[in-house]
Image: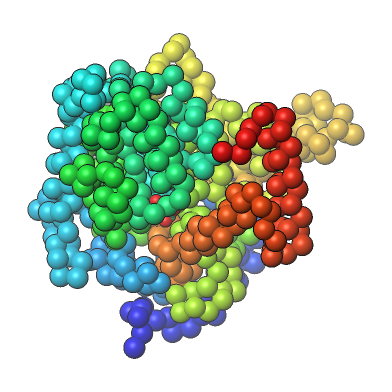
Amino acid sequence: MSIYPFVRPQPLTSSPAWKALQAHQQAIRNTSLRQLFADDPHRGDRLAAEGAGLYLDYAKNRITDETLGLLEKLAEQCGLHQHVEAMFKGKKINITEQRAALHIALRAAADEQISVDGRNVVPDVHTTLARMAEFSEQVRSGAWLGYTGKRIRNVINIGIGGSALGPVMAYEALRHYSQRDIDFRFISNMDATDFTEATRGLDPEETLFIVCSKTFVTLETLTNARAAREWCLNKLGNKEALRRHFVAISTNAEEVSRFGIDTAEMFGFWDWVGGRYSIDSAIGLSTMIAIGPARFTEMLNGFHAMDLHFRHTPLRQNLPALMGLLAIWNTNFLDARTVAVLPYEQYLARFPAYLQQLTMESNGKHVTLAGTTVDYQTGPIYWGEPGTNGQHSFYQLIHQGTHLISCDFIGFCQALNPLGDQHDELMANLFAQTEALAFGKTREQVAAEGIPDWQAPHRVFEGNRPSNTILAERLTPYSLGTLVALYEHSVFTQGVIWNIDSFDQWGVELGKQLAKRTSPELESTDDPPLKHDSSTNALMRRYRSLKKGAAMATGYDGD
Ligand code: G6Q
């Protein structure tokens, strides 16, 4: 019996749509964006789509109408629509873990019915949201007091990966709307510097820790949570006190209580929420405390609006599907292996890092759902920095380097912190960059500027660099929700075409096991024999000997 309901009749690369796209790419490979825009004065209006308050301009991609038609065929042949329905209906599309991938249920309206194994999960979602709202209001209003009766002034999220990147990104993105008399900090790294710096100068009596871990067995998180417990106990001196200073977010009540957090102080979620898709679950508690339950609901509404758009909009107007299919075109047919995410919005500084996990953990896979090794590229590398900072560093390579890099520009029409005409200046940079990347600067233009011949080759810009531009009116909780959901569903679309499991992460699991095996050999003081390869052995030997040297120099006694 097949565990996967969508068996492909043939491998992707021998499907008619794929072959047609390959032939088409050969046919148009010498057509430039310059030419495409010259041939069609309305291209900029035609190759754009709008949904859930976002505007997507995709005209500056190296595509024609025929490309779009063929990509549409590819989506049909790969059963995109059926896969979307399977996800929305709670089918176990994460086949290697035999789980549903139901992040869409986290933002479903209370009267919707979405079932997993015959149980409607929406009421559970709303019960948890209501508990989170009650708790958030208590912390925000000062009704929730620390053990010694002081108000909570610091909220520290402890978690890593999916239990950290969402909370950090959302807090930074929505900081404008946050309650400013509470300080929000985030600890994730095993490096004790993270803990030390995050707690520096804080008073345990005024600090609340939110320990986020789906499994509650993640080494980094438990180590940092233990350090936090010690830090609190040192000042508060009483285990009872911890109840006022620790809450847990997890699916694993047993481990939470084994750690010493009362499950009355735990907010749950479910195995059908993947870590990198958990920002709308109780993992978002720090976000809710920061912006308040009403604005958190606005964010969920933004996600939900994009979910509906993705599920019900025809492909040519469907933002996530278009972005996903364009990513396939750029990756597999134009050989663009990386995507630069360039938000022209300081509050979105952590958005590229968040997207790195979402995209690369989801689609960094090399076998199909059937376990066969793919013969095509899958997930591209995502990276980026907010504009205009990147312009003064890596944009050089995008404009004139040898790699083809597709770019996602993200901008907002209204400033959250207006200052003179700085917002117009900022957005002028965004628009000018997309133009320069697409159209470049020809030898003739360079000559007309009076540039000497010898220098001209260095001053010519080939152009023809593909980009998407996403515009929204203003960065709000709602628009952030639409933006994240846009990428979630674009990633899903790509995964469907590549026929991979976008919801597992065996590479992350491997890291967790390797660390467990190696650390005892470093911690032991009697230098046990090393049984790794010669390179790893040599590195570990050097580490062990220099570690002792450092101990002598600093008077560290090894405790
Ligand atoms: C996300 C991954 C991974 C996970 C972390 C933390 O999709 O599964 O990044 O979120 O490893 O795991 P816990 O939440 O279980 O601590």
Q: Looking at the picture, how far across and down is residue 7, in whole percent?
A: 39, 81
Q: Looking at the picture, how far across and down is residue 161, in whole percent?
A: 45, 48
Q: Residue at x 57, y 31 (%)?
A: 432
Answer left or right for 127 relative to 439: left
Q: How many marks?
A: 0
Q: Residue at x 39, y 21 (%)?
A: 202
Q: Looking at the picture, how far across and down is residue 188, in whole percent?
A: 46, 40
Answer left or right for 395 relative to 237: right
Q: Nearer the viewer, residue 269 or 104?
A: 269
Q: Nearer the viewer, residue 37 or 145?
A: 145
Q: Looking at the picture, how far across and down is residue 555, in whole percent?
A: 66, 29
Q: Nearer the viewer, residue 381 or 428?
A: 381
From this viewpoint, is residue 20 visible?
no
Q: Is residue 504 above or below residue 452?
A: below
Q: Nearer the viewer, residue 373 or 537?
A: 537
**Residue situated furthest bottom in the rendering:** 1
From this viewpoint, is residue 112 visible?
yes
**Residue situated furthest top in the rendering:** 420
Q: Residue at x 15, y 70 (%)?
A: 118
**Residue situated furthest left in the rendering:** 111
Q: Residue at x 14, y 62 (%)?
A: 120
Q: Is residue 276 above or below residue 366?
A: above
Q: Is residue 343 above or below residue 320?
A: above
Q: What colour-coding does the image apply?
A: rainbow
Q: Is residue 234 above or below residue 377?
A: above
Task: Quadrant for residue 243, please give it.
Answer: top left
Answer left or right for 86 relative to 412: left
